[in-house]
Amino acid sequence: MSDIFELEARDPEIYRKETRKNTLILMAIFIVLAMSLATLSVSFFGHPDGNNFKWNAAGVFTGFILTTIIFKQILLKQPWMSSSLYGWKLKRCLMSITNCMHQVEAGVEQNDITAIKLLRFYHLGLMQMHQLESNDGGVSELQKPIQKLLLKIEALELDPQQTRFDSAWIDSIKQSAKQKSV
């Protein structure tokens, strides 16, 4: 079964504001849990004149585990986490393409439609990520590869608005590369 991801229009200012707020909330939860559990573990198991490092570390580690559970079970389901979740999913999609970029680029050279779709999504997704994170330098670096791909897309009469990513395309590209190498 494949996962589908669709690029969404997002306001960069709102995105940054929401992700900063979400990060601060998560950090606050971790700090409170880690410090509280470290203090409790030292007070219950520690020794007044001994080295209590292991009890402090155990409390911090337990705080980390509890923060992770709270994040996965409660926070991720909250509507105010949508910007962070969207950014995380977009970055995962981009990374999965990056991990097989040499195969994608080889497919584009051979006019493989799936590879062209992947590379176009990659360019659009990377541009959006740079805009959301206010990285103007990253956007300007993409202009030459984007123009080269757009010329190919136009020549093949394909839709340049590739805002959808299907994880099955990655498997298809890898499979094609395996078959060509044999």
Image (cartoon, grey):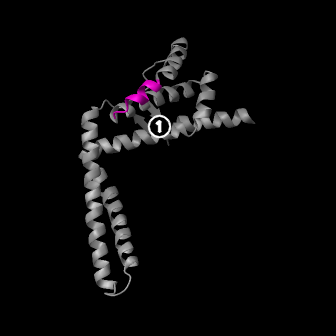
Residue 109 part of the magenta-drawn span: no
Residue 149: percent from left, percent from top: 53, 20
Q: Secondary structure at mark 1?
A: helix
Q: Quadrant of residue 33?
A: bottom left
Q: Which residue is drawn at the image coordinates 34% and 84% (left, top)?
A: 46
Nearest the viewer among 21 and 118 is: 21
Q: Quadrant of residue 126?
A: top left
Residue 127: percent from left, percent from top: 41, 29
Residue 36: percent from left, percent from top: 26, 71
Q: Which residue is drawn at the image coordinates 36% and 40% (left, top)?
A: 87
Q: Which residue is drawn at the image coordinates 34% and 56% (left, top)?
A: 72
Residue 167: percent from left, percent from top: 50, 38
Q: Quadrant of residue 106?
A: top right
According to the image, label 1 marks what residue? Answer: 94
Q: Which image quarter is the C terminus in? A: top right
Height in image: 110 above or below 92? above
For the record, the magenta segment spans 134-142
Q: Which residue is drawn at the image coordinates 35% and 69% (left, top)?
A: 60
55 relative position to 94: left or right = left
The three-letter code of the residue at mark 1 reads: Leu
Nearest the viewer among 109 and 27 is: 27
Height in image: 144 above or below 169? above
136 relative position to 21: left or right = right
Height in image: 64 above or below 46? above
Task: Provide the major secondary structure of the magenta segment.
Answer: helix
Residue 135 part of the magenta-drawn span: yes
Q: Furthest-right residue in view? A: 182
